[in-house]
Amino acid sequence: MNNQILVQALLSLPNDAQESIVDKLFVPNFLNSLGFSLMETVPKFATGNGSDTVDYAARHNTEDDIFISSKSNPYLLLEIKGRDVNLSEGTAQYKLAVEQIKRYLLSQNCQTVKWGIITNSKHIQLFRKHGKIIHPASACLAIDLNNLNKIVKDIRQKIDLTTRALTVAIYNNKGGVGKTTTTVNLAAALTLIGKKTLIVDFDVNQQDLTHSLGIKPTKNTFFLCLEEKKNTTILKDAIHSYILQVKDKRLIFDIIPADEKLFETDEHELRQIFKIPRLSQILNNLKSEYDYILIDSPPNWRFMSQSAIYAADVVLIPTKHNNIFSLENAAIAIKKLIPQVQQFRKDSGPIALPIFFNGEKMTEAQESTTHQAIDNIIEQAGKDKDNKFDLLPYFYPRSTQNRKDRHIFELPSYAHIANAAFSHLPAAYKNKIARDYYLALVKEYFLQ
Ligand SMILES: Nc1ncnc2c1ncn2[C@@H]1O[C@H](COP(=O)(O)OP(=O)(O)OP(=O)(O)O)[C@@H](O)[C@H]1O
Ligand SMILES: [Mg+2]
């Protein structure tokens, strides 16, 4: 019934309706169709960022906390535009709206928010917030009378899910840049701050992650999970726990080790047996049980890494400042490989996080050479006739339109990090300095 009302609301809108008309005729019905009553929505919600207000905040009431009166702990933000604003993906007005909703999502009074929507009733896009990270949870969809109900139903289904992990693929086509080391220490650092974490060794050829923790690869358990169509009971057998008892505290993260049968099966056969989205389907079933799922990927662009990137919300890319190939490969992943997967997935995901430098000391002279190389990579990508791409935010995330800030996060070289694998204990558990490095990485990329 409601849905018919929403269709009527859309029909009643003039083609060039300004924001106030979209707000009046469409938005109340839209929020209602997402399951929020009038008492559960606050218009012109103050974000706490100066005098900024977002058009609507929403949250379900609890018995003793009525959102419209307490105005605290919002769950969803909605930013509306007029139909005279072109919100189709890639336009300047679309980019501005995305920047705006991101700013609101990260603002002081919106820390509890999990979802953000931009719409002008012609286009709509859903974003998800997890800690500091904001990633698209749908493509920017063109609304029409036929698909409106389906779009609203899909959004509602997504926002009704509460605890969900952020899935991070750790990837660089270049070998030896610290993917595995980052994965294992990130898991340890996240565990130390109480985040429930699962890591997946999807570099089944090298199996470094599995070996570095002193865990035996499985014989075919995970292979069977990938093979099964929907059965998740055997999945439990594929998950091991890595436990460290420190005095009266137990530190636990989970791991899906490399699988021998996956290793023995060649690429061609793998592609016959499973499809690329299969890993994603399996991990989606586990998302409600973890805060973070980290996938270690191999240094190539084949079945395993494609599956890992397909399964990810975001891709974390370690590089080495003094290795031009690691920087160029990062650029290729960002402007070419990840967009390939985005096209395949159709929900605008995954997105690349800004690169970081791992494990090499840097002198001032080297720093200047590295920045020159990066400036060059950015310039070339911006001039590419066939695939023009703005790499700036992925290399220099603190840069703005008016000011270039060359900050790139650095995880220093540290002997304890290199040696830790011998003792089967993550360096972040074993050594205070290593721990601080990885906690800084967690803070820089993930925590709000
Ligand atoms: N921050 C660091 N400080 C010191 N050593 C490091 C650091 N990061 C990684 N290493 C060391 O560098 C080597 C390569 O790291 P790692 O195996 O994690 O790279 P990788 O990208 O996973 O490699 P591959 O592409 O082969 O999978 C390892 O010996 C590791 O111990
Ligand atoms: Mg590795």
Image (spheres, rainbow, N blue to C red):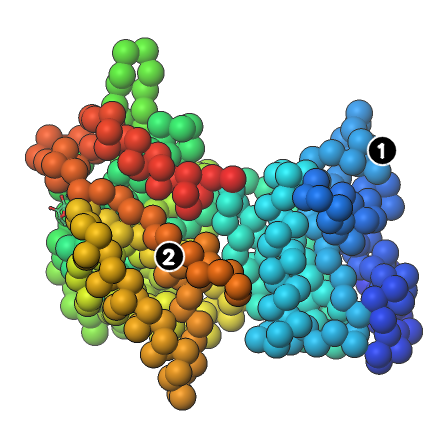
Q: Quadrant of residue 279?
A: bottom left
Which residue in the rendered view is the most extreme toward the bottom?
Answer: 385
Residue 389 percent coordinates (x, y) = 43, 76
The span from disc 2 to disc 1 (Cα, nearest Å) is 44 Å
Neighbours of disc 2 within 10 Å: few (<14), some (14-19), many (20+):
some
Q: Residue, x 86% and y 56% (percent of image)?
A: 28
Residue closest to the eye, 107 or 5:
107
- Secondary structure beneath dot 1 equals helix
Label 1 CB, ligand 1: below 8 Å? no
Question: Around disc 1, counting alpha carbons within 10 Å, would you say few (fewer than 14), some (14 to 19), or many (20 or more)?
Answer: few
Q: Which residue is mark 2?
A: 406
Q: Is residue 1 left or right of residue 426?
A: right
For residue 118, which quarter of the picture?
Answer: bottom right
Among the two numbered marks 2 and 1 on one chain, the one whose residue lies closer to the N terminus: 1
Is 213 on the left or on the right of 83, as rendered?
Answer: left
The residue under the point 33% across, 63% down is: 307
Which residue type carries mark 2? Answer: Arg
Question: Which percent across, then down, holds residue 105?
Answer: 62, 48
User: Which residue corresponds to the image point at 27% horizontal and 16% vertical from the top-left?
Assistant: 246
Image side of residue 363 versus residue 397, left or right: left
Is residue 190 visible in this depiction of the protein? yes
Residue type, label 1: Ser
Callout 2–callout 1 Cβ contact below 8 Å: no
Q: According to the image, label 1 marks what residue?
A: 69
